Amino acid sequence: MNLADYGLSIERGFLAGFEPAAVTLPAELQPAREMALRLPELIPTGRLRSFLGTLPKLDPAPFCASASDAELRIAMLHYSFLVQAYVWGEPDAPKVLPACLAVPIWQIGQAIGQPPLLPYSSYTLENWSRFDGKAPIDLSNIYTLQHFEGGMDEAWFILVHVAIEARAGEMLHEATKLVGAAKDEDTAEIERALGAMSAVWDDVNAIFDRMPERCDPYVYFHRVRPWIHGWKDNPALGEGLVYEGVAATAGKPQAFRGQTGSQSSIVPAVDALLGIGHAGDPLRSFLDELHAYRPPQHRRYIEDLRAQSVLRAVVHKLGNPVIRELYNDNIRKLARFRTRHLEYAATYINRQASTAAGNDPDVGTGGTPFMRYLKKHRDEAEAHLLT
C-alpha cells in the first residue's frame, strides 16, 4: 500500500491534497460562493431563506463533467453550507429544498460520490487554509474558509479537527508500512513503525485535549452544533427533505445523516490496521452507514487496510514482548482518544441538552444514543489488548 494511491500524504493525511483557498470556481458558481461566504452577515436578519432563494437556478451538469476534483469539492463546500443554512436558519424546518440549492448539491454530490448535504469532508477536510503556505498545518498557522455564524468557538471546533487530521498523516504512512512488514514478519520494521505510531497518538491526543481552550460547551451546543444536523431520524423533518427539481427522487423526501466527527477516517483506519472489531449495536450500524459519507478514496483506504492487515495475528504469533507492548500501547492510546470523545460528548452535548427544552440528552446529531455506545466501543477496543 502507498498513501499516494489514495490521494493521501504524510503531511496532510486525509486533508485535501490541494490548497483549498487557491481553488477558483467558474463565473456561474460565483453567486453561490459569495452568498455562502456572507452567511455570518445574513443569518442574523432572521430571513435567511429569502436571501438564499434568490440564487440562480443552474444546470451544473457541464461543470460536474469537466471540473477537477478540487473544484468539485470547493463547490460542495459552499453549497453544503448553503443547504444547511437554508434548512436550519429559521425556527421551523422546511419540507422542500428549493431547486436553486437542491439541483446543484445533488449533482455535485453524485460527482464526488457523497450524499447531498454537509459532510465532514466539506466541514473540515477542505475547509481550511494556512497563513504561511510553507509552514506546517497546525493550530498556529491555519484558519477556516467557510462559516455559519462565525466566531472563535465555531472556528476552533473545526480547526482542532483539521490539526488532528494533519498530524495523523504520519500514522497513516506507518500503517501502510506495517501492512507489508507484518506480512514479511519483519520484526525490526514492525517495532519501528508501531513506536512511530505511538508517538503520533501522543500528539493527536494532545491536540484533542485543546478543544476546551477556545470552544465553550454552551456556545458549541447553541451556536455551532445546530447547523450540522441532518434529516434522517430527525423529528423536525419527519420523513426527510424534498429536493425540488431533482428527477431521480421522484418528488419523495430524502433522509441523510448529519455531519459528525465520526465521519473522520482516522479511527476506522486504525481499527482496521490493528484488527479491532465491534459487536453489533445501533452505533455500530450507524458508523457502518457513515462509511458511505466519506470520500471514495478514503473508504477504499480503510477497506484495503481491513482486507490486507495481518498485524494482530503476526504480533500474537511472534510472541515478542517489546512488539506486543507497542501494539498494546497503540490500542491504549486509541482508547484514550475514544475516552476523550466520550468526555466531550458528555460535556458539549449531554449536559447542555439536559437543560435545553425539546432536546434528548442521549441522542447525537445522527440520531443515535451515543453516550451508551461510545463507552461500549471504547471498552471493546481495550478488550483487544494482547496478553
Image (cartoon, helix red, strand yellow):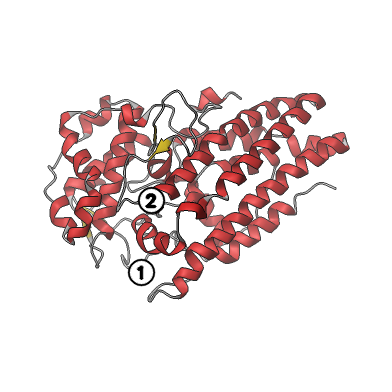
Q: Which mark is residue 187?
A: none
Q: 372 or 207, which is in the foreground?
A: 207
- To which residue does mark 1 refer? 235
Q: Residue at x 31, y 35 (%)?
A: 74
Which of disc 1 and disc 2 is earlier in sequence?
Answer: 2
Q: Position of residue 297 (x, y in %)?
A: 48, 32
- Looking at the image, which is closer to me, 231 or 350? 350
Q: Which amino acid does label 2 sit on?
A: Met
**Residue 10 pos. (x, y %):** 56, 27
Image location (x, y in percent) of residue 127 = 37, 39
- Say if residue 277 shows up in the picture: no
Residue located 86% across and 34% down the image: 318
Q: Quadrant of the N terminus?
A: top right
> What kind of element bears circle 1?
loop
Q: For the point 18% across and 52% down, which residue is it?
A: 98
Quadrant of residue 16 within the rendered picture: top left
Q: In which quarter of the image is residue 228?
A: bottom left
In the figure, is residue 7 to the left or right of 334?
A: left
How busy is the neighbourhood of tag 1: few (under 14 within 10 Å), some, or many (20 plus)?
few
Circle 2 sits on which residue? 152
Residue 336 x/y as whole percent: 66, 51
When asked about the image quadrant of residue 179, the answer is top right
Kind of residue indicated by mark 1: Pro
